[in-house]
Amino acid sequence: MGVYPTPEQGVDCTPTSPDDCGVPRDAPILLRFNRYLRPATAVRQSIRVYSGSEEVGAGFLQPEYDVIERVLVFRRQDNSWLEPGALYTIEFVVPSEESSYGLEAFDGAPLSEGAIPLKFDFRAARVEPPSRPAPPEREPAPVFADVPLFGTCANAACHNAAEAANADVPRMGLDLATVAGLRSTAIGKVAHQTDLSGKAGVPLENPARFGVNLPIIDPNRPDNSYLLYKLVRKQANFGADNCKTRYDDLPLQNGECLYQEDESQRLREWFVRGDAMPRAQPDLDPPEDAALTLQRMREIQAWIRAGAKP
């Protein structure tokens, strides 16, 4: 796990230190996990940020979970939300008998203390931050025609009803080639490989076991979209940028990369069945292992987050 602000950042600042000593007052809170999260736990109640006592909270923090990088971002709308020079405490909530809130992995494994403590302090800088959007900026959402997946996976061998060998039945009943196909087979539709609840075809937002009756594409919820988990399971989709991050305040440690084979296998064993996407096509001459890029996956995530509008 990685975190920004870092533990005790700025606590050694003194009245005679430069005004920019400490954490920038418009800084987001960033949490990087080595496991994929259970989305229902990636909520504002799973973290406490306060000054002095829990009653003096830092205000309403809006969470946003980046599935591709396993980063949970907490932002406030205010450009300058930390009080100048104030000492703050960050506390990560762990599920207990008193509270059901708390960060968990997708398979229910609770957050545990490691190199990063579950509770630590930091101090805000005194200087007003420069006028800029709170980093990192959100990815712009592409329109349907520019979403790269549908040119890669909507071919004759995969998810294209018009060109499928069985004419009207594309692979797994999923048609990604047209707007009509997307609406009728993907958006808000349960992935066949997850349709296990006994309520056939009914998408679930927060089942007791995450991954059951998961929608293929859940508008505004990339973290609840089976499609995205099929993509992150394929190492080739991360390509040459596998060891790069878009979060400048939370760099990857030496030797760390975004794709992790052991976590990919956990996804497969828990709920992400079948081949990762895009599917390899060994029947072609020469064989082709189709893949996206890290940037393309980010665009797909942004498109879903913005409502998956055809």
Image (cartoon, grey):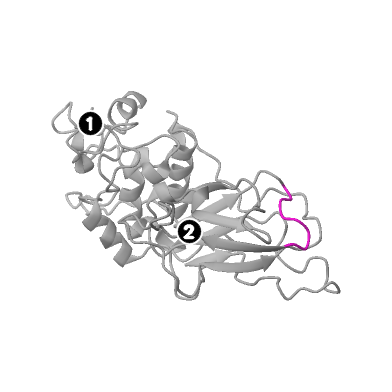
The image quarter containing residue 175 is: top left
Task: Please say if 114 is above or below 208.
Answer: below
Residue 63 magenta-highlighted: no
Viewer-nearest residue: 205 or 239: 205
User: What amino acid type is highlighted by mark number 1?
Assistant: Gly
Residue 93: assigned label: 2
Q: Position of residue 14 (x, y in %)?
A: 80, 74
Q: What range is drawn magenta here?
A: 79-86
Residue 201: assigned label: 1
Note whether residue 251 is visible: no
Q: Position of residue 251 (x, y in %)?
A: 55, 67
Note whether residue 225 is visible: yes
Q: Is residue 151 left or right of residue 85?
A: left
Q: Is residue 269 left or right of residue 294?
A: left
The number of callouts visible is 2
Viewer-nearest residue: 111 or 191: 111
Q: Secondary structure at mark 1?
A: loop
Q: Position of residue 191 (x, y in %)?
A: 25, 38
Residue lying furthest front:
98
- The residue under the point 26% across, 61% down is 265
The image quarter containing residue 197 is: top left
Q: Residues within 10 Å of mark 2 (few under 14, many from 20)?
A: many
User: What amino acid type is highlighted by mark number 2?
Assistant: Val
